[in-house]
Amino acid sequence: MIRGAFCDVAYPGDECLKGSREGDEPYLLENEFKGKTDWTILGADFLDQAPDGYASALSFFSDEAFRFYLPAYLIADLNNALQSADPTFHLCFGLDDFYGSQPINPRRYGDRTWLAEKQRKFAIFSPSQAAAIVAYLQYKATQDEFQQPMIEQALQNYWVVPFRTG
């Protein structure tokens, strides 16, 4: 389901990999993912450590790169091959009842909440991609007792609702 939903997502281009210019990690990410135009051949060990052992790529991808590389992370996670990278967290944080209403950084972003930011970020997914993400999250909710409440809230507050009519 994941492979089928994401098979036609275009590589965002080397110049559109990082979503931040703050700190070293976005530049390390850009260097490590540059030219990696086929997410299906990326190994779980690479994904779990990128960039440079920080395991933080999912935090620093541009929206387009996040969409392009996410299926590699989802599949690696379903294969229990990730130890550090956590796609579930990145798909749920800010969509939960507690953090969703919290402002991101009022001095920088005004009244923008985590929920508003995640809605903006995830609007890039097609209905079939969102359906694959929902299936992944539903499965993870049965496997991860610790993250289950956050997953269920994210499903209820965002993932399932916008795509019910799709």
Image (spheres, rainbow, N blue to C red):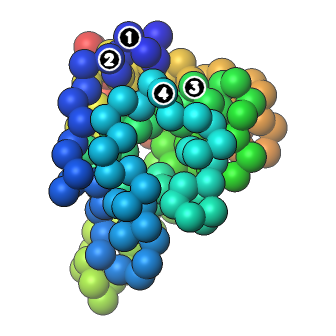
Above or below for 10 versus 64: above
30 horizontally vs 80: left or right: left
1 or 4: tag closer to the N-terminus: 1
Residue displayed at 63% across by 48% down? 48
Q: Can you tell which quarter of the image residue 56 is in?
A: bottom right
Labels 3 & 2 near each other (Cβ < 8 A): no
Residue under label 2, please give it. Answer: 7
Q: Residues within 10 Å of mark 4 (few under 14, many from 20)?
A: few
Q: Amino acid at mark 4?
A: Ile
Q: Give the secondary structure at mark 1.
A: helix
Task: Give percent across and percent down for residue 5.
Answer: 35, 16
Query: Between residues 161 and 25, which one lies in front from this camera angle?
Result: 25
**Mark 2: which secondary structure?**
loop
x 43%, y 15%: residue? 3
Report if the CB atoms under discs 1 and 4 are less than 8 Å apart.
Answer: no
Which quadrant of the rendered structure holds the C terminus?
Answer: top left
Determine which residue is flagged by label 4.
41
